[in-house]
Image: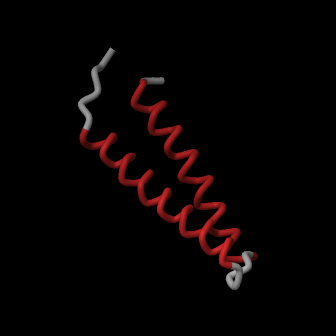
Amino acid sequence: MSTKNEVIEILDDRIEELNRGMEHFISFGNKGNVESLLKQTERSIQLDELVMIKNRIEYGVRWRNK
């Protein structure tokens, strides 16, 4: 596996983990609890940043072929 694929795979794993957490909160979370809402907001910000980083890495970095 190339370095690019390894990096993208790591990012995809974390993005999926954050998505699962968000889906769980939407289904079962306590939307009236300030601490839960703050954690969900933090999760959403992390997800947005990781997607942006993934896109920059995927399309903005010139990867050397081995």
Which residue is pictured at 73% across the width and 79% down the height?
A: 30
Q: Residue at x 49, y 56 (%)?
A: 46
Report the colour scheme: secondary structure
Residue 27 vs residue 36, the one in the foreground: 36
Considering every residue shown, the one lying at the far bottom of the view is: 32
Task: Identify whether 33 is placed above or below 48.
Answer: below
Q: Position of residue 39 (x, y in %)?
A: 62, 66
Q: Residue furthest top?
A: 66
In front of the other: 56 or 36:
36
- Residue at position x 37%, y 47% from top? 53
Residue 42, compared with residue 35, is above or below; it is above
> In the displayed image of the protein, which residue is found farthest to the front?
34
Residue plotted at (48% across, 24% down): 1
Specify the quadrant that holds the C terminus.
top left
Question: Residue 60 in the image: x percent, y percent?
Answer: 24, 41
Estimate the x, y position of residue 9 in percent, counting from the top left.
51, 38
Left-right relation of 30 to 3: right
Q: Give the quarter of the image for residue 63.
A: top left
Would residue 25 appear left or right of 2 to someone viewing this image? right
**Residue 41: which quarter of the image?**
bottom right
How many numbered discs, if any?
0
Q: Position of residue 20 (x, y in %)?
A: 65, 61
